[in-house]
Image (cartoon, coloured by chain):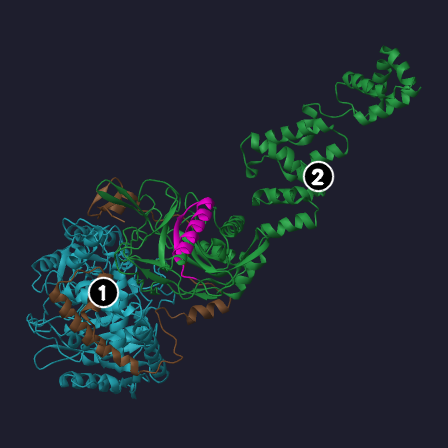
Chain colours: A brown, B green, C cyan
Amino acid sequence: MKLTEHQVQHVARLARLALTPDELSKYGAQLSAILDAVDALSQVDTSGVPPTSGVDTSELEARLRLGGSTPHLREDVVAGEVGAKAALANAPQVEGSSFAIPKVIE
Amino acid sequence: MPRSDFQVVIGLEVHAQLLTTSKLFSGASTSFGGAPNAHTSIVCLGLPGVLPVLNQQAVELAIRAGLALECTVAERSEWSRKHYFYPDLPKGYQITQYEFPVCLGGRVTFDGADGEKSVRLTRIHMEEDAGKLVHEGSVSLVDLNRAGTPLLEIVSEPDLRSADDAVEYLKSLRDILVWIGVNDGNLEEGSFRCDANVSVMRHGSNTFGTRCELKNLNSFRFIKQAIEIEATRQVEIIESGGKVDQETRLFDPQRAETRSMRSKEDAHDYRYFPDPDLPPLLLSKDRIEGERAKQPELPRARRRRYVEALGLPAYDAGVLTADRAMSEFFERCLAEVGDAKQVSNWFMGELSRLLNESKSTISQVKFTPAQFGAVLKAVKDSVVSGPGAKELFADLFATGKEPSVIIQEKGLAQVNDDGPLLEAIAAAMAESPKNVESYRGGNTKIVGYFVGQVMKKVGGKGNPKRINELLVEKLKG
Amino acid sequence: MIAALGKALAEKSTTSLETTTTALTAAKRDTFNAFLAIDEAGALAAAKASDERRARGATLGPLDGVPVALKDNILTEGVVTTAGSKMLANFTPPYDATVTARLKAAGAVILGKTNLDEFGMGSSTVNSAFKPTKNPFDATRTPGGSSGGSAAAVAAGIVAGALGTDTGGSIRQPAAFTGLVGLKPTYGRVSRAGVIAYASSLDQVGPMTRTVEDAALMLEAIEGFDAADSTSSDAKKTSWRESLRSGVKDLRIGLPREYFVDGMDPEIERSVRAAAKQLESLGASIVDLSLPHTKFALATYYVIAPCEASSNLGRYDGVRYGHRAADVKQLKELYERSRSEGFGSEVKRRIMLGTFALSSGYYDAYYRKAQQVRTLITRDFEQAFQNVDVVLSATSPVLPWKLDEKLDDPLAMYLMDVLTLPCNLAGLPGLSMPCGVSSSGLPIGVQLLGKRFDEATLLCTAQSLESALNLKQEVR
């Protein structure tokens, strides 16, 4: 599909990227070409096909059915606090023990 | 056209903080206060490379809430990322549940102005809270202590038709969540927050008007006020031929108005998609049913039982179930004594008074239900007098000592033995022959005088009923 | 080589300190731009500690005292970790990735951090914000990518082994380009905790080494369930070395028709088919195979990976760490300028692509559709593995290209990954190993794909092939 300049601008804003007019037209053309290639997917009949979003859960489901538990849960205990000093160690700007940024006007 | 031609339609979204010790996906503490960023871990800071790991207690509490609110708890729910940029959102997305929430359906019942009402729930899902942004001089400061705190979002259907009902719905919902230990119910600290979707339509209409979402409603009073103000605003727009815009509006309690929060930025596009860092949340049927079996009796049901089965006045039943701990203690004391009315009287009277005076709560009480039972038994068996019982209970409340010990130490036991009483009666009659004559002459009321004299002689510990009986016998001659 | 070095250390013919010092000298010379950071103090301290353990007879295992390098998207506590991006040029992690911690616990000496395409996005290591890495076999050519720095560091003989990450071929393709063994484990086999995410459902860490045995040794050190990674599997660990020598007799090896693509370098095809023949002569049977949805893998990948990347890279906002543009006056400016300055053009392109594909109105057509096709690609493999134990193909359809070759058509670049992507989409283990040399003297890699969590069969097959081929590939 061909992206309009307005669409490219909209996506850049959503992604918080400031693009120069050159970048806008370059990315516009490149994204359109990539999306054209990606449109090949529309040929595939996926009716009734469940999406795969990552971890294969069939094994976990089988385990639960057998009365087991899933391994990926954490006990509710306080652990791993790094403290404000370490939290702020890489910060570009700090005030007190807070991260500081230019004033947000709402 | 007057306002009364219109009907307000309200749906509520409640964010209730789950009572966990640590955050939803990290081990940082959820405790309130502390220096900015003191309660942060690498995960809630959104550092590169960090991954979320789900807190099992949050899951436990979500299931509990779902069952108490009569929802269908999903055997499979899913985590999604909701994207937007804001300085208090460390990862650029919030982990929430979108397409597949942990609970579907459900209802909240409450007492409205014209009787019992039930509001349907759409869904309940878990999500993480954002941090805090404060503005100071030329900068804004980011504190991530709250970031990642587990929240339950409870979304109602637009079933509410008045601001008063909205408040009653929220109170009932809050009572349940607090009762089952899922939330602390604190609106001021923001652990129980509410957004209201408000629209208006003409009476008799089936079509909802365009809704506005109201934010910043941090007390029941503000919620009622904001809904009423917003409804009036919408009616005025419609009556003057205008159209209501769908938008988010902020309630300003100082100026008693709602105002648009629409920013000049693009409309939100949250770009939800399933979080690849988290497997779906899988709950077995057994687990859900196991939780269901453990469900406690809820406050409304208990209130009803107190009135209908125990015969308590509605007011007493309300007071006794206002607080889970109070109610549970009442239940245990009732099991010791068996007479609901009697136990209720002690709870409503002496116990409430002592708790008030000592500014303490039921969970701090030093005595056991068995000891409470012993006090009531002492009264029933005439071991102590009425006033003696109050003294005994006050001392039990203060010290938690065994009632039998207190009775002894304070000498609260009544003289039930006839011997000493007869001696005192004989003495009193001998001291006052004129009054004896008077009694025998028909002035039977004077027996009261003798009871007082006898009681004085036995140091106030005589059983007044027995003294009376013996006196009447002796005075008659 | 790790096993050989381990033997030398055990026989006391060298010490870790001596080996580490030599490695440090070579790393500092860094002829091929393999390194972004060298942790001299840390490496020397670790080497000394290892020698002390050995003197006490308390050696930790086969990696104890062995210098290794880590791709610079793997966090190292106290040592700057950049992901090859200007965005993180000054980022010092306060924690170790799980794989870093596990290597340290195994006694390995972490020499430094290697170059990569920014955030792992690329297959040439030219997309590094800092410098391009050169191929030790021909310094005018690319070592591949995105783990090109790790590949060059091992191929140049600076370290015996290195860790890379593989989202769509980023371990296997550079391994093929530099004559190494590169293993992408099954998704979930190795923890991703502390690895800077590119595409979370595809990323996996794995070893890049000179021999199959070395890859097994490194895998053994880093694999296994990690409570900090909810996608890590608690599947049982295997003792890889024990399975190594079991041979390929009666193993069924499938050659997928769709992987012998048009435009493939004929020398590569010849070499790969010869490798298959070699396995046949060792007792394996070769099976013709079809993976019908292969042609959609590229499109699927270039939806899913950018979508996840656009999300994963949202955290780089100049607020808590990373690059912040100078003199920003308001929030919008802070975000837009910091991100535009901090990210390179390939990263921005993928963020744009992913943001678009997830945006309102396009999600179903792109993201959901891609996830459904991903299911079909996975099913292709499930079906194939009913009849075969290993799938064999080339790793890359092309030989390493010239560094100055003008490749500004991103789509043409993406096509180069076509043979490595399906493995990530299906979460399978994949291994690339050298199977020959081109007439121009460049290494050629063969790719072996296995069943989920069946790294044992992969390694065993690879080792049989390795000893049968007995290639002597040295950097000239």
Residue receiving disc 2: B342
SS for callout 1? helix
**Mark 2 neighbour class, 10 Å CA radius: few under 14, some 14 to 19, many 20 or more:** few
Marks 1/2 same chain: no
Toward the right, the furthest residue is B477
**Placement of B287 over or under B427, stated as above or below:** below
Residue receiving disc 1: A10
Q: Position of residue C385 (x, y in %)?
A: 35, 81
**Relative to the observer, which residue lies in front, C293 or C369?**
C369
Is C2 situated left or right of B404 in this image?
left
Q: Position of residue C185 (x, y in %)?
A: 29, 70
SS for callout 2? helix
**Mark 1 neighbour class, 10 Å CA radius: few under 14, some 14 to 19, many 20 or more:** some
Residue numbers of the magenta segment: B209-237
Q: Position of residue C91 (x, y in %)?
A: 19, 52
Chain of the residue that carries numbered disc 2 in the rendered image: B
Please state which amino acid type lies under the numbered disc 1: His
**Relative to the observer, which residue lies in front, B35 or C232?**
B35
Please state which amino acid type lies under the numbered disc 2: Gln
Q: Nearer the viewer, mark 1 or mark 2?
A: 1
**Relative to the observer, which residue lies in front, C37 or B17?**
B17
Q: Position of residue B120 (x, y in %)?
A: 52, 60
Toward the front, the furthest residue is B1
Is B46 situated left or right of C472 in this image?
right
Our reading of the magenta stretch's main secondary structure is: helix
Asked if the stretch drawn in magenta spans residue C339, the answer is no
Q: Hey, which quadrant is residue C275 in on the image?
A: bottom left
Q: CA distance from mark 1 to mark 2?
A: 72 Å
